[in-house]
């Protein structure tokens, strides 16, 4: 496996995903948690960082733990740290260099740049610059502004790049990572969805044997794939529980229940919406809404789980990004996300998390391998508290119904808008949904009548991981059609807006 040491960069997870795309297993660990003595490590990548090597609080690592033992690639701060530790010079340039640059000169004999074109575009994002590399190193690429854009050690298997090969805007970044992971580290690229399914089903059979397993389904891809895998391993020894809190999308509960039954899952549907609506009455604060829904959810789920008296295991669709230990740099909570499923403590259940090493795109590959319906696999992420965080102000059944109608028109239109390559608009968007601005009223005119109703905001973003997101540039004709249909068909809405904010500084959800 490849170890990625995290120094707090925004793009560390992206490095992990790129390595996984090479069908190679990798682990992302905090910079100071290198697994010394682990013989399965074939290479190490050092990430970028918000710090300068000169900052007193900069993250420092003992390079001798791996340098000289396995190949090492330093990216951005990683490259600066290796240079600085080896006697090179890293200095502030005064202006931050951010954005596109081109490799004007490349050492084409260097294995890291195999297949590279001279002039290849790279993405820079740094304040400091490496002004002198250590004596035992040589430069292997330069841009117009940065002479030491990449360097390699002459006596150790160490490479370093100032730019970010993991981001989309470094055009040949995937090639560079492939050169490192496959050619230099010698990965045999053995991961495949088929082999994952085969080995995981075998492991699950061994792990849980004849015991009963319970699992909370949410309709999302992670818990659905988790259930389908377990179903393949242990059949009806798996009992699934799907709680309807009343704030799902239009008809979603019944549609998803049908899909689950079609997959042969043993699933209990619980309509607990009365409880949730009662407890949410008059609550307007977003964090308070989350807290109540989270608490109620655990209560309902646990009450249901306790009826299954022979259960020994609780399965969860936890995936790798949920578990990566993040370096707390700002230490601030923007939103408290509750994840479905609380552990009923008095039941003494053991935890089973078959997807815990997978990234989202790998979960989707496994879903395909298991022949799950496309709609379930490609479903956009949906927040646990559902439409409750897409209705500004207090929640009522009426408001939920209005939003469900508007949202349904929007999302179905997205599925039905087919592009030249046969894919739908829905597939090109990370996440989309309508938001009911129920604390606002505005004047409109319908026929001869004055209306005084709520606006609906449409939200659609493109993203890689929900950490950062750009508003999706949806076609005008699509927006026009959706706006018309919502205003004409949804009573209570007389205005539609499109949200053109990116994250940061906005967030994906409005609450
Ligand atoms: P934000 O709004 O923070 O959302 O940009 C990032 C991603 O997280 C989802 N989200 C939630 N998911 N419980 C969840 O399970 C929550 O309370 C919650 N709030 C936001 C959001 O839909 C997006 O995918």
Image (cartoon, helix red, strand yellow):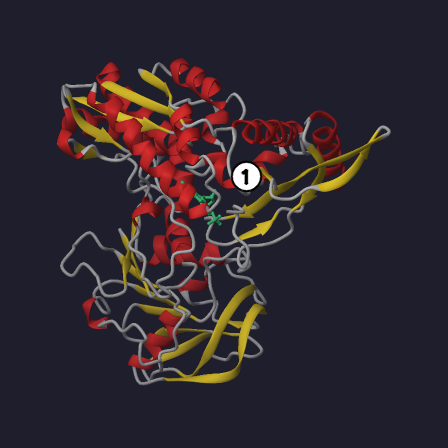
Q: Is residue 22 above or below residue 232?
A: below
Query: Dot 1 corresponds to which residue?
Result: 391
Camera-nearest residue between 506 and 322: 506
Does mark 1's beta carbon lie closer than 8 Å to ligand 1? no
Height in image: 136 above or below 461?
below
* Vertical order, 318 against 8 (above or below): above
Question: In which of the image's four quarters is ligand 1 placed?
Answer: top left
Residue 305, quarter of picture: top left
Total tally of numbered discs in the picture? 1
Give percent across and percent down for residue 414. Answer: 63, 32
Q: Nearer the viewer, residue 118 or 90?
A: 90
- Where is residue 69? Give x, y as percent: 21, 65
Residue lying at the far right in this picture: please name it: 448
Q: Is residue 474 visible?
A: no
Q: Residue furthest front?
A: 282
- Residue depicted at 42% across the width and 25% down the height: 273
Q: Going 52% across and 46% down the picture, which residue do you hit?
A: 509
Element type where label 1 sits in the image: loop
Residue 75 percent coordinates (x, y)? 40, 67
- Could you classify mark 1 by the number of other residues whose Cα lies within 10 Å: few (under 14), some (14-19), or many (20 or more)? many
Q: Is residue 455 above or below residue 103?
A: above
**Where is residue 217, by image quadrant?**
top left
Left or right of 229, for residue 423: right
Tell whether 502 sits left or right of 53. Answer: right
Which of these two is toward me, 112 or 497?
Answer: 497
Give the quarter of the image for residue 304.
top left
Residue 260 on image: x %, y %? 39, 18
Q: Residue at image x 33%, y 17%?
A: 267
Q: Relative to the observer, which residue lies in front, 184 or 174? A: 174
Residue depicted at 30% across the width and 51% down the height: 324
Residue 428 appears anywhere in the view: yes
């Amino acid at each position: 496996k490849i170890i990625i040491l995290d120094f707090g960069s925004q793009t560390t997870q992206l490095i992990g995903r790129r390595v996984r795309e090479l069908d190679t297993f990798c682990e992302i660990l905090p910079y100071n948690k290198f697994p010394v003595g682990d013989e399965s490590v074939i290479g190490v990548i050092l990430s970028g960082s918000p710090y300068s090597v000169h900052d007193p609080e900069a993250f420092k690592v003992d390079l001798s733990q791996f340098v000289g033992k396995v190949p090492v690639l330093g990216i951005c701060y990683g490259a600066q740290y290796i240079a600085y530790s080896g006697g090179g010079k890293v200095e502030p340039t005064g202006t931050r260099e951010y954005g596109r640059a081109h490799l004007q000169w490349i050492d084409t004999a260097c294995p890291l740049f195999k297949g590279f074109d001279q002039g290849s575009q790279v993405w820079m994002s740094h304040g400091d610059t490496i002004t002198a590399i250590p004596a035992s190193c040589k430069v292997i690429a330069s841009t117009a502004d940065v002479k030491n854009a990449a360097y390699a050690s002459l006596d150790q298997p160490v490479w370093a790049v100032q730019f970010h090969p993991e981001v989309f805007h470094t055009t040949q970044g995937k090639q560079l990572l492939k050169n490192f992971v496959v050619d230099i580290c010698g990965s045999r690229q053995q991961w495949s969805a088929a082999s994952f399914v085969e080995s995981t089903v075998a492991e699950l059979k061994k792990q849980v044997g004849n015991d009963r397993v319970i699992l909370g389904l949410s309709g999302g891809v992670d818990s659905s794939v988790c259930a389908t895998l377990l179903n393949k391993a242990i059949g009806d020894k798996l009992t699934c529980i799907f709680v309807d809190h009343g704030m799902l999308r239009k008809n979603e509960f019944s549609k998803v229940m049908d899909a689950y039954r079609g997959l042969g899952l043993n699933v209990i549907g619980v309509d607990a919406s009365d409880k949730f609506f009662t407890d949410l009455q008059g609550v307007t604060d977003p964090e308070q809404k989350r807290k109540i829904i989270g608490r109620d959810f655990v209560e309902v789920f646990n009450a249901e789980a306790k009826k299954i008296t022979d259960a020994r295991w609780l399965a969860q669709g936890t995936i790798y990004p949920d578990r990566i230990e993040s370096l707390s740099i700002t230490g601030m909570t923007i939103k408290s996300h509750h994840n479905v499923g609380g552990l009923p403590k008095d039941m003494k259940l053991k935890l089973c998390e078959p997807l815990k090493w997978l990234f989202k795109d790998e979960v989707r590959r496994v879903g395909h391998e298991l022949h799950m319906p496309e709609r379930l696999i490609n479903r956009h992420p949906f927040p646990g508290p559902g439409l409750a965080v897409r209705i500004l102000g207090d929640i009522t059944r009426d408001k939920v119904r209005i939003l469900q109608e508007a949202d349904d028109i929007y999302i179905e239109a997205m599925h039905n808008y087919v592009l030249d390559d046969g894919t739908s608009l829905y597939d090109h968007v990370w996440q989309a949904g309508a938001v009911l601005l129920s604390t606002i009223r505005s004047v409109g005119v319908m026929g001869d009548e004055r209306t005084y109703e709520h606006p609906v905001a449409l939200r659609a973003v493109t993203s890689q991981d929900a950490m950062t997101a750009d508003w999706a540039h949806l076609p005008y004709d699509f927006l026009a059609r959706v706006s018309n249909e919502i205003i004409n068909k949804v009573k209570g809405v007389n205005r539609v807006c499109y949200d053109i904010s990116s994250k940061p500084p906005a967030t994906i959800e409005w609450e």
